[in-house]
Image (tube, coloured by chain):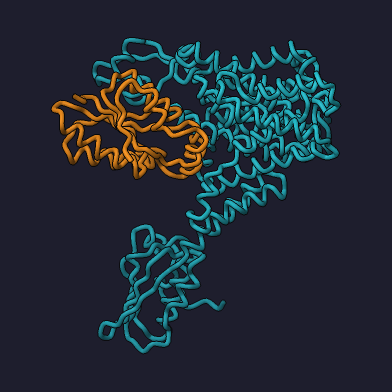
Amino acid sequence: MYKKILLATDGSEHSRRAAEHAIAMAKCTGGSKIEIVYVIDDDNAKSDVLQNWNKADLGDKRKDRIKFAEQQAKEAEVPYEIKTLHGEPGHAIVEYTNKNNMDVVVIGSRGLNVLQELVLGSVSHKVAKMANCPVLIVK
Amino acid sequence: MYYRLHELLSKKYIWYDSLCFCRLDFDESSRSLKKIRGVYLKAHSIKEHWFGNIKGDVLAGIVVALALIPEAIAFSIIVGVDPMVGLYASFCIAVVIAIVGGRPGMISGATGAMALLMVTLVADHGVQYLFATTILTGIIQILFGVFKLAKFMKFIPRAVMIGFVNALAILIFMAQLEQFVDATWVMYLMVAGALAIIYIFPRVTKAVPSPLVAIIVITVIAIMTNSDVKTVGDMGSLSTALPSFLIPNIPLNFETLQIIFPYALALSVVGLLESLLTASIVDDMTDSSSNKNKEARGQGIANIVTGFFGGMAGCAMIGQSVINVKSGGKGRLSSLVAGIILIFLILALGKIVVQIPMAALVGVMFMVAIGTFDWSSLKGLAKAPVTDSIVMVVTTITTVATHDLSKGVFAGIILSAIFFVAKISKVHVTSRVEGEKKIYAVTGQVFFASVEELVAAFDFNNDVKEVEIDFSQAHIWDDSGVAAIDKIVLKLRDNGVLVRLAGLNAPSSNLIERLAVHRRPGAKLSGH
């Protein structure tokens, strides 16, 4: 039933649990595929660049954040693809979901940034409200 | 973007980095392309750079122009010059950088970092010296680009970079405080109102920059209520003329150079630092790379032009570039549009601009300061190595105390270097006895800072016949290191001990071969 599964990840504890659920879902249906999506928030570009100024590759830290989900998918032998998006996380995920007609979105209930959540509202809430498909929010 | 081989072959002529024109031929005999290095040439066609994203660039350019105006005026006021100096600078730099810059999508103009460096120059010598300094800054920056020094910016430690932006934020904030001297409660209320609009308005729409909305609203309120708060007009005059070519009215002699050169050097370094930091941020946001040396040259050309048209030196702007990319700008067109719209608006609306209350601009500058400060660094302060935190704090404090970003950066770099030397100068020497032989194993870097510790680790009054020094876990870097080894060997030899050096790596053993005295016949410890 769920062939195109979008897994939103930011490396947080909740997103790790979300990864497990997404993989379990993918296993239930033959021929399903997970798209692991990581959103680079442009508002954090400055501090990301600064925090990684002397490092060879800024991508390293970001790769780390996707690594858990990727490893899990690989171990479970579920087909997956990694996508990096730019922009405000909630908006970017919704846009991608609706444009690519995803069958389900799996997302952690809380992300990394507590302060932003307080001001802007949670990403998962935004996605649940605006996506055109079922959304599984993992606690 | 990367063109593949067959794509390259379909276009016989390509633009390389927008300026250099080259022709491609497919060489059948060697099955490769001539005139370019490698098959994957990183090539941007000039068309792609300029017209690849017309709609996005034009819209973003308009947004940026609107956001540039308040900052250009506020930075001029920090320097203590007419608002036109900053506005002309932002116009000239934005337009010139659009053509010659190395990072499409990045916005440059009059900036706070540069403005803060010019305050004493203008106060002591006047605005004509500022124009001359701006031109000299451009020349130095071009030299930086030509000699490809931009890559050395990467050598500046992370902690210094963070200290730099934090100090910049604090200085911009502090520069606003003088506006509050003798201010009435109306002023405080207006600043609070401006800040409220700046941070709340984006929830309504992000299409119009909220600082501009704040300025319009506060200005309208000020005019309607006839309040007598200070306005932009009180800070300097605003002409409604296009910038025109001028040659700075200064004596062309050595004395002038002595005055302007230190300022120009500090401005070039700070300008390039912020420009290359901004370029890296835009690189990151757009998933593309840019030519940093070309950007350095471009910044130089832009500053020279600005100086001749009555503007102050500028550089890339982090905040504006982020606004540009987020608004959909990524080509060269957006910077050009921003510059042209900016000057058009000033010419058309000059009479209204002078009525903007200073309170509104102070609000905008507070926002710039808050946005510039790297708040995540405070969180990292506890986590980062203690030396990193010290370097960051020292960079910030030095800058705030001297009001000079280049001094802060310099202090930070020196301190980092000292910490680095201290960290790697730890040598460990262990010893064990095997029969008649005593074996010392040296671990670490042997150089001027570690030799004392090395020599102290040896026991010269031992009654062994033979000593072996194992250097397999060590590296000898300089003549101080070699001299220390000489000292150890000769001293032991004086006591009748047979000494053997073992496990030297190739560079270390070359150095010893070239410099060591103990290999030569009849070598003695020298007197001192």
Viewer-nearest residue: B37 or B445: B445
Q: Is residue B300 left or right of residue B514?
A: right
Name which residue lies at 83% across and 28% down: B229
Q: Is residue A43 left or right of residue B402?
A: left
Is there any visible trace of residue B151 in the rendered image?
no
Please indicate, yes or no, whether residue B340 appears anywhere in the rendered image. yes
Q: Position of residue A64 (x, y in %)?
A: 34, 42
Which tint is chain A?
orange
Q: In the image, what residue occupies the spot 37% across and 28% down?
A: A128
Q: Quadrant of residue B79?
A: top right
Quadrant of image for the N terminus of chain A: top left
Q: Does residue B54 appear to the left or right of B508 in the view shown? A: right
x, y percent for residue A10? 37, 38
Residue at (61, 22) in percent of width and height: B209
Q: Quadrant of the C terminus of chain A?
A: top left
User: Could you tell whether B264 is left or right of A9 in the image?
Assistant: right
Residue closer to the observer: B459 or A77: A77
Q: Is residue B23 above or below residue B311?
A: above
Number of numbered discs visible in the structure rendering: 0
Above or below, B365 against B415 in this view is above
The image quarter in which residue B59 lies: top right
Residue at image location 37% in from the left, 67% down from the top = B443
Q: Position of residue B454 (x, y in %)?
A: 45, 72
Chain whose colour in the figure is cyan: B
Q: Nearer the viewer, residue B181 or B109?
A: B181
Q: Position of residue B122 (x, y in %)?
A: 80, 35
- Most extreme residue toward the left is A30
